[in-house]
Amino acid sequence: MADVASIIGPIIGPRCLVTGGCGYLGRALVAQLLELGCEVHTVDLAEAAPDPRVRHFRGDLRHYASIAPAFEGVQTVFHSAALIATVEERFAQPALRRMAYAVNVVGTENVLRASRAAGVRALVHVSSFNVVMDHRIEGGDETLPYATQAPDLYSRTKIAAERAALAADQPGGLRVCAIRPGGIWGPGRGGMMLDAMVAELAKGSFKATIGDGKTPLDNTHVDNVVDAALLAARALRSRPGDVGGRAYFITDGERFDAMEWFRPLVEGLGHPFPKVRVPGALMLRVATGLEVAHRLGAPVPTITRRSIRNLTEGAHFSIERARRELGYVPRLRREDLSDLLPELQRYHDSLQKSARAQ
């Protein structure tokens, strides 16, 4: 992170705000901003601050009045808070649907409103590559249109949120851009991607892969996302006319099959990588059944039609615009997963120990 930090310096402003500052990405952003010497505000539903040096505001993005005080005196906002709900809208229980739209769409509108009211200069909106994913994508760039056939709550609400954020970019006022990371991974607990796989391995339930073994799906190390967010903030402050109102795909810059990406983790934790492949069409039917069950009252499923479609349709994006306009270069790649194996082994073993104790 030092290379990026050394060129950011005070450009982004002495006081920054991170929404969702207690979440996985939010904590990483907060840590780097503190290292840069910024005064950091966070707003989150969590009671406790992610770091004692932070001024933490407990607030709900759905309610403007509860978050507005956090924006006072802030120059740059990083909007990373979001609700991840990949159930298709037609199968979602009404309460989940209302929550997804309230947090991701109304919440973003409230963040924009509070930013304008407080005179914030720059806002980096953390979006997702899901906003364009309704078909297989190979080498796609930012000219891709928003997905029109994305039926899941997460994609739909993130599309609406990104549209609102980019439309709010105003020359002479609040400048806004969006970054679109892939699946976020990295050290520490709380990252859904690695935590979920380690949990499956600890249970001994990872017995098969899904799809044809040739379906790319991009991932993004959390530190690469932080780098991109800082670079985007710097560009908004120093070259707003070049980046304001624009979106950027942010990935590790590698092409791997969605399931093959996990091989070093699986084998590094002492498990054989499965040779059995389950057809995507079969898993899509399973996911449909789980989502129907959710509509009838069951909990939100961990396997959804969106997650299966990601594994079977795939998406690989170009990061050339981010390289050219932000100066983004991914510093961490899948090979760096090996550095995480000791901590992931401890997590794996603790899960197995807890299971035996029950």
Image (cartoon, rainbow, N blue to C red):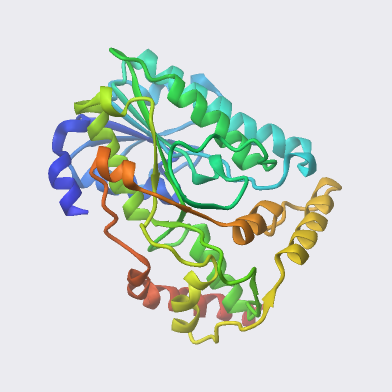
- Identify the residue at image location x=25%, y=41%: 324
**Residue 14 x/y as whole percent:** 19, 30
- Identify the residue at image location x=75%, y=58%: 287
**Residue 277 x/y as whole percent:** 67, 76
- Identify the residue at image location x=19%, y=27%: 238
Left or right: residue 89 compared with residue 243: right
**Residue 189 x/y as whole percent:** 45, 62
Q: Residue 113 or 173: which is nearer the viewer?
A: 173
Q: Is residue 60 visible?
A: no
Quadrant for residue 124, please give it: top left
Q: Residue 102 or 180: which is nearer the viewer?
A: 180
Quarter of the image with the C terminus is bottom right
Quarter of the image with the N terminus is bottom left
Q: Measured along the vertical axis of the image, is residue 188 above or below residue 202?
A: above
Residue lying at the far right of the rendered structure: 296
**Residue 114 x/y as whole percent:** 42, 19
Q: How many marks?
A: 0
Q: Residue 192 or 189: which is nearer the viewer?
A: 192
Q: Measured along the vertical axis of the image, is residue 349 above or below residue 141?
A: below
